[in-house]
Amino acid sequence: MDNIVNRNALSVSNVSKSVSFNGYEFDMYSDVWKLNKDREIRVGFVAEFESSIQEDIRATLVYFAENKSVGHVANVCREIKGYVDNGFRTITQEGVLAYKSKFSSKRDEYRVAVLRVFLKQLYFLEFKAVSDQVFELLSSWKLSGNDKGMAVLSLDPEEGPYSDIEFEAIRSGLDNKYAESVIDDEEYSLAQLFAATGRRPIQIASLKIGDLSIDSDTLELPVYMLQIPKAKVRGRGFRAEFTGFALIESIGQVLSVHIANVKKKAERQIGRVLSKKERDLLPMFPDDIRQFKNLSSEDMMAALAMDVAHRKTSDITSKLKSIINKLQITSERTGKPLKTTGYRFRYTLGTRAAREGAGVLTIATLLDHSDTQNTKVYVANIPEHAATISEIMNGSLMRYASAFQGEVVESEDSVLSAVPGAQRIRTSDSSDNVGSCGTNAMCRDYAPVACYTCPKFKAWRDAPHHLILKWLLDERERIVEETNDLEIAAINDRAIYAVTQVMKRCDELRGDAAYG
């Protein structure tokens, strides 16, 4: 297989071959380097430099390809190409000053910093392309890094953290659509891993089956522990270090079913029973396992240890977007279908932690950062995503809150014709009925509050829903007064929005009936 590392590749007869940070063999003299399963880097621009330094440039790029992520290599290549496209074929003081002058905005200074990193490494490797004078000039510059966390700080409604309403709509939507078989085991598992762990797409894509373990002895209950590969480990390759993450039982159970399906499918495609070691190395979200069909067990183990059969990061992100689209959630902030990226869950986890009082070190640990430079943004501006209830109820986008998932019906008779014996849903003090359960299945959720956000709920048009709303608002106010904690007080906010939506829908139906 082309992408599987040959352990003897770096032999005397193959001196131009190297192995990337992610374990992919490439020829340093080729104009296209495939550095991982997702990316190819084009380095043909090296030929634009003066012939006397082309070898130095290419060899230093090899250093970056061997020791840095493919994303970092791509950024370095962009800046080197930008430098040579500026008309300079050697590395001179005039050339680097001219390049720096192109980026007058502090927002763009990080690009100059990327080029400086490459040129200083060129110098450290003792190549002659960078003189002492150029090195001293580069070292004298004070450059700004790229702006970190703008989507978080600005609460960007399309790229920043989800609001509480949006996040709860996603979580309940996943549960409901899974119960309705709209999404399958793999889709539920993938989306819940993003929501629960806040990990980067590349980390989710790098998971293998053996990363999930189940401990039923310590607590006499199943504890699902996932070892998640770190994404940014300096000088280390694919799956070099891990961080443990505990999953709640409901997610762990479905993930276990998905894993069992992956094992069965892999054995069917390969045509034999796999050993436990082979099964543990299978990707949790595989691409194509059939490519291993004719390999020996030893060769297959070597191949599975890499990322060859893992789904591309871009495919993982596309799949996540497709799953969230199936939930049909409308953002209450934009009035449009909810937009999704793999990083929005990460931003949400960090933001919610900051609101709970977590410091930068705790958030860095939670998000698997190696330092705190990227986590300060979460505590610099601790926002309250949910506006006050009166503001939300009076807002023009209230109808988009995606809270009420059920149906408003005329009366109990409308339900009984479809679900004989449907259970009545009573108010909090059990003195009045507000609707019916649209299923006879056993339910342990907290009625009537949970009913308003359940897709099975059949709200009666003329029921006293205002009593539920009053109780919820009074309870919210009581919690605020007793705890002074808006996070705890907001626990039933989505139910409040749902009841409000039911009341508005009932008013609309009564109006229609009056003019019918």
Image (cartoon, helix red, strand yellow):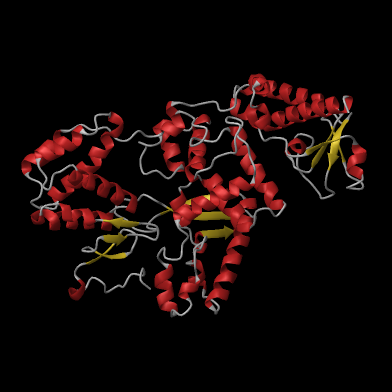
**Side of 264 relative to 138 (left or right):** right
* Relative to 64, residue 492 above or below: above
Give the left or right position of residue 48, taking residue 76 as reference: left
Which image quarter: residue 476?
Answer: top right
Q: Position of residue 404 (x, y in %)?
A: 72, 35
**482 shown above or below 298:** above
Residue found at x 11% / y 45%:
91
Foreground of the two, 478 or 92: 92
Up the image or down, 330 lies above or below 292; here it is above
Q: Nearer the viewer, residue 415 or 47?
A: 47
In the rendered image, the quadrant that contains the C terminus is top right
Instruction: Say which quadrant the N terminus sits in.
Output: bottom left
Q: How many marks?
A: 0
Q: Can residue 101 be spotted in the picture? A: yes
Residue 179, image x, y percentages: 71, 52
**Is any part of residue 218 visible from this angle?**
no
Is 347 placed left or right of 166 in the picture? left
Please identify the residue farthest to the front as the structure is shown: 516
Tell me where residue 159 appears, x and y as whole percent. Answer: 48, 37
Nearer the observer, 99 or 464: 99
- Left or right: 237, with 283 as reference point: left
Measured as percent of width and height from the top left, residue 307 is found at: 41, 63
Residue 361 occupies quadrant: top left
